[in-house]
Image (cartoon, rainbow, N blue to C red):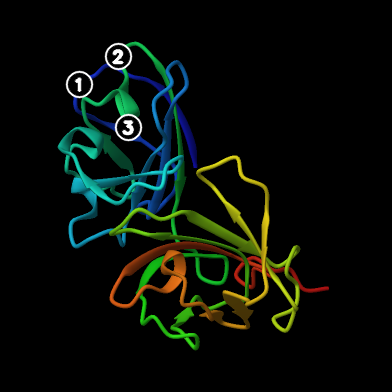
Amino acid sequence: DIVSFTGNATARTISHSVGAAPEFMLVKNLADTDNWAVYHASNTTAPATDYLILNTTAATADDATIWNDTAPTSSVFSVGTSSLTNGNTEAMIAYLFAGVEGFSKFGSYVGDGLANGPFVWCGFRPAYVMIKRSSALEEWSIIDSKRDPYNNGATSHNLIAQGTEAETNVSTRWIDLVSNGFKVKSTNTAHNGSGSTYLFAAFADSPFKTATAR
């Protein structure tokens, strides 16, 4: 769902129409130069007490004023007093996502620091994957099946969400998109630091849940 609302700097709930509790939320103050606030349901054991920033490399931070320390439900999400999510008299926009079988997946994995890294199950072949190391300063890495359609390609093309840098090409592929998820193939700490937790958002190449036969 996409929800627009006017902030009031008072902790409250905002209605949404996702039909499930959102697992991934992006909120931006349209009237100010505030950062993008990010909620991810797999971010720590109490994700509603924490937040990430989409436009920086910052690690997870604890702040009760962002989501009012309250997890979203199937009908509402909560905002606190922060101008990032509830600026007084200011226009706000929220993009809300929930996992849908065969279409989208939001979760986490723990890195092992090996070149033959973790396999992450999604239940579909991803067309798009965004990954963020939640416990440390690291980029928001993006890979997709259009720029890198083959797992045996000579290079891997990486975009980062938080900066204006050009696309980078690396000689060692850092992720393989497979039929039921993705396989991490990098020792880079942005994707696979040993013992580090990584959050991801993935969307399907061919959404089976909503596919129509002919």
Nearest to the observer: residue 211 or residue 91: 91
Which residue is at a point 19% across and 27% down the rendered structure image? 11
- Image disc number at residue 10: 1
The amino acid marked with disc number 1 is Thr
Report the residue at 32% width, 32% height from top: 14
Q: Is the residue marked by circle 1 packed among few (<14), some (14-19), or many (20+) residues within 10 Å?
A: some
**Residue that appears at 21% across and 25% down:** 81
Q: Farthest front residue? A: 171
**Label 2 packing within 10 angstroms: few (<14), some (14-19), many (20+):** some
Give coordinates of residue 24: x percent, y percent. 40, 52
Q: Quadrant of residue 213?
A: bottom right
**Residue found 46% across the figure and 54% down from its top:** 139
Relative image position of residue 52 (x, y in whole percent): 33, 46
Say whether disc 1 or disc 2 marks the residue closer to the N-terminus: 1
Q: Which mark is residue 50?
A: none
Type of amino acid at the residue the image marks with label 3: Ile
Q: Is residue 1 left or right of residue 178?
A: left
Q: Nearer the viewer, residue 76 or 29?
A: 29
Q: Secondary structure at mark 3?
A: strand
**Element type at marker 1?**
loop
Helix, strand or loop under label 2: loop
Residue extending farthest right: 214
Marks 3 and 2: CB-CB under 8 Å?
Answer: no
Residue 88: mark in rendering: 2
Front position among marks 3 and 1: 1
Most extreme residue toward the top is 89
Structural crowding at the residue carrying mark 3, measured as other residues with C-alpha within 10 Å and reported as few (<14), some (14–19) or many (≥20): some
Q: CA distance from mark 3 to mark 1?
A: 12 Å
- CB of mark 1 within 8 Å of CB of mark 2? no
> Which of the labelled discs sits on residue 14, or is there none?
3
Against 86, residue 60 (above or below) is: below
- Relative to 29, is 23 above or below? below
